[in-house]
Amino acid sequence: MSKKKKDWKTEKERLLRLDLEERRKEYRKDFTQLENIPTWRGENRSKNNDGDDEEQTGGGGLGDKVSLYKGDITVLEVDAIVNAANTSLLGGGGVDGCIHKAAGSCLYDECHSLNGCDTGKAKITCGYDLPAKYVIHTVGPVARGHVSQKERDDLTSCYKNSLDLMKEHNLSSVAFPCISTGIYGYPNEPAADIALNTVKKWIEDNPDKIKRVIFCVFLDTDFAIYKKKMAIIFPDDDIEDEKEQLKEESIPPSTQSTTNEETEESEKGKLVTKALCLLVSVFFLLQLF
């Protein structure tokens, strides 16, 4: 005999009342805690320290607020994960289907009550059986290889509206998939540019409203693209400063003193030359008289 179907409103209210430890008992699968996902700054610092483990203290800069994660978005224990949904919000292929399957039937029922979603917009639901507390559903543009300004604007709106919705509900951590790059055909590199730059600007405008934004990719291709672009868009200024300091410290003291001595000798030479010129001028003037 099948179990009685849960009412999504009752289940949502119940789940949102639970504390973290109580919710963890109801997860369907293993989960990944936010604390176990390195920040972009922390990951770079670990690599620059020859793989030594380093405590991620986090200075509150851009590099401390973003992460690059390769894997299953449905296992992430964050405030919200973003679903690359279709306009019906009733599930589909790719990440959309995976999220609906992992969250359970209550997600479908709540989505059914939302009457769909327009391209570029975003709507929020409970996460139900997911480790994520909420799911933010956003509808990316269908590009199929053709990207006009409208597609660029719509994709930008997907990220911005999702972040605004998160802010509205006082959430501080969110994970994004690669929106529109699957069957919707948005080229991967331009999509990554929009994702990274839109998130960066939003964090700069709302520094106190976000703890972490995770760029969750599944394909090796997207991982390589994001890794390359994040190094440019979210540089670790502290590491660059340390490199410059090391360069200065690597100059031998004898070399520095030699340089100073050469400068002093040059100045002395200029003074001697001026003095000789003055003496010659005086000598010629005396000859005239």
Image: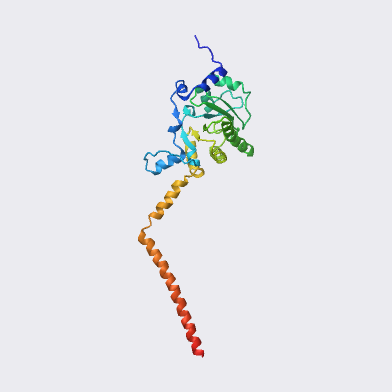
What colouring does the structure picture have? rainbow
The number of numbered discs placed on residues in the rendered structure image is: 0
What residue is rendered at 52% in x and 28% in y?
A: 95
Q: Quick check: 16 left or right of 44?
A: right
Q: Dividing the picture into quarters, in which one does residue 168 lie?
A: top right
What residue is rendered at 49% in x and 84% in y?
A: 282
Q: Dividing the picture into quarters, in which one does residue 106 lie?
A: top right
Q: Against 218, is 103 above or below?
A: above
The x, y position of residue 281, in whole percent, is: 49, 83
Q: Is residue 221 visible?
A: no
What residue is rendered at 52% in x and 29% in y?
A: 81
Q: Against 212, is 103 above or below?
A: above
The x, y position of residue 33, in whole percent, is: 44, 30
The x, y position of residue 261, in whole percent, is: 39, 66
- The residue sitting at the bottom extreme is 289
* 281 or 178, nearer to the observer: 281
Q: Dividing the picture into quarters, in which one does residue 185 lie?
A: top right
Q: Is residue 108 visible?
A: yes
* 236 or 222, nearer to the observer: 236
The x, y position of residue 210, in whole percent, is: 53, 35
Q: Against 116, is 196 above or below?
A: below
